[in-house]
Amino acid sequence: MSFNVCIDIGGTFTDCLVADEAGAVSIFKAPTTPGAFHKGFINVLHVAAKGYGLDAAAFMAAIDVIVHGSTVSTNALVERKVAKAGVIVNAGHRDVLVLREGPRKGAFQWRLDYPEPYIPRSRTCTVKGRIDARGHELEPLCEADVLAAVQHFKNEGVEAIAVGLLWSIVNPAHEIRTRELIQAVWPDIPVTLSSEINPTPREYRRIIAAAIDASISPIIKTYVRALETALAEEGFKGELLLANCVGGMMPPKEMIAKPIYSVMSGPTLAPIAALALSPEPDIIVGDMGGTTFDVSALRDHQLIVTAESMIHDDALGIPKVDVRSVGAGGGSIAWVDDGGLLHVGPRSAGARPGPACYGFGNMEATVTDANIVLGIIDPDYFLGGAIKLDRALAEQAVDAIAQRLKIGRLEAAYAIHTTSNHNMVAAIEEITIREGLNPRDSYFVCGGGATACHVAEMADILGLKRYMIPRFMAGLSAFGGLVSALRWEQNGVLYTDAKRFDFKGVNALLADLKATSAAFLADARVPAERQSFEFAFMGRYEYQSWEIEVPFEMEGDELHPDELPKLVEAFHRMHERIYSIRAESDLVEFTTWKVKAAGGYARQDHWRDFTLAPQSGPVAAKASRPLYALEAKAQEEVPIYDAAALGAGARLAGPCLVEAPTFTAVLKRGHEALVDDHGNFLVTVV
């Protein structure tokens, strides 16, 4: 037997999904090991091996592909534990990272200090030389300035260098020559060129992307090498693929070459899973883990990509799948402020010490503790009974909140539960309404181990009529990795407009971008029959400051004049969808062109081949227990169903609980579930 595996490292647990030759998928979990993530990675593989009754060596030898979503670079950026980097810019532009894009936030908060630049001025060096907007050299590159900058960086102990020069997106000659000069005198230093990492005409975004990429380059290289070494020592001889932030996978050497694409890559796997699980056009994906709640959306069954992602006070610079995170996980800590107002999060108990019920020393109430008190979670069946939780410690922690609020234990637990729900609802509204999606008309797909405890109330608050609780909800991101293709995106800048459309230039650029993308897939050993390409442009109305991304299709290998009206109409339609405005009399400008390449690997879709046996006989509850009901403000006895005992076609009606080894689902009154052929719960609110 052989296996495909995906491992996703979360804040509390490391998830491992394994698909066998027949398409059957199993989920395994192990505690995350902060500070040495590769150890948790190997630990969960050992847990999976035990689950299949194999020793670790035999299991490793049988794995064909491991795909992996990493949080290493994201954690490094959030905690500011990045490598010491320097940046080289044009003379006169030393403050590009200081000024950013003229921050508009907090304009009247005069007590705030202006944020420090990502790379300080002391490690920002300038060089003479200038390329103009048409790619012409106005002033030769001063090579002496480059060598002086290198010496300065050596004196400063710099570990990586970013180079961002004006209009390098049109003519990168000065950036390329700068790298050649650096490597001639300092061969081992990583060098990132802005024109290669983020070809966009916006100077700050191009240079901040290069700076971030350079600062995490040593970290990602060290992590990937440690992971490859650990796997080799375990006897793994298959292919390792790493998740990127554009919604796909990359070989390790490509990730080492462009490490910025690892930032926030893990959460992008959840919407990939939703793409595979449901054909619905507009989908909301909520992934509640132990530390955060990650929310994303699909519009017209397409990933929403944004260039507005932030790391502290700086833009990430590159486009990425739009995923928003709030501190609303199962480990989020409840607290009462001096005014007597209850808050939940963003502070989290994390993996260690974890919620109070874990018994590792934390005495503050968390969402998980509240769910135990409410009767949602059975402390004796957490992770299928692999971990025993302490009800008394959970009650003690919730009692402390109840005393502060001067209410009863159950009321305090429900206050924690519903406050967390409203925090998540706010995040959902932010990503849907602002992206032209109506939550009430959208389909909700649950992810993460805790979401099914909360989705029923969130559905009522949002007015959702349908939602899905996937069979592998607790490892939704890992499932996304298991079904994801290798994916890459190539961008090129070529300005034109609908009146003077440059067909020759655009077609030449698209052909070059497609060739580069095809070479990426070929290098990743993707056969031609498994390769696919999608096209998009960044467009705006004349005099607008910002562009939007618009996908388009070509009838052949080139754009022809009769296809221009379709491009313009696609832009009008997308602009109207996002902003509710359609200005057909305005000139449409095209600034950037994109080719998105995807390539599948063997048995990527075999999970569809495995189906559940039909439900035999009436559905029977395995037990019952008291569950807090808001309407009665007390606990009422409800049936509990074993997810593993339900067949395809089984129907359940709330109020009830559904238990699986990796999740517990609450169905409220009026919520009815149907089990589909793959074991997912399709819920309708009646």
Image (cartoon, rainbow, N blue to C red):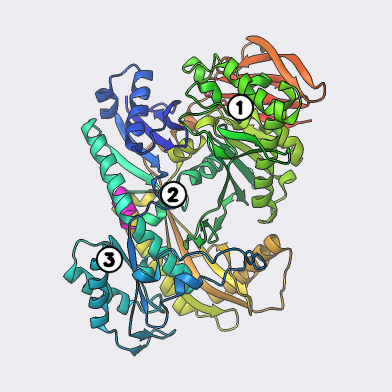
User: Alpha-carbon distance for marks 3 and 2?
Assistant: 22 Å
Amino acid type at image mark 2: Glu
The residue to which callout 3 is attached is: 156
Q: Specify the quadrant of the image occupied by residue 380.
A: top right
Q: Secondary structure at mark 2?
A: loop
Give the mark nearest the N terminus, 3 or 2: 2
Looking at the image, tell me whether mark 1 or mark 2 is earlier in sequence order: 2
* Marked residue nearer the N-terminal end (1 or 3): 3
Left or right for 458, reference 131: right
Task: Tell me where residue 222 appears, x and y as whole percent.
Answer: 28, 47
Identified by mark 3, the residue type is Glu
Query: What SS does tag 1 mark?
Result: loop
Relative image position of residue 35 (x, y in whole percent): 36, 39
Residue 420's place in the image compared with 386, above or below, is below
The residue tagged 1 is 676
The answer to whether residue 383 is above or below residue 591 is above
Residue annotated with mark 2: 79
> What residue appears at the point 28 percent right and 28 percent down from the top-left corner?
60
Residue at point 48% right, 60% down? 316
| CA neighbours of label 1 inside 10 A, class few (<14), some (14 to 19), many (20+) | some
Disc 1 to disc 2: CB gap under 8 Å? no
Disc 1 and disc 2: Cα gap in Å? 42 Å
- The segment highlighted magenta reads 252-258
Q: Secondary structure at mark 3?
A: helix
Q: Position of residue 185 (x, y in %)?
A: 17, 70
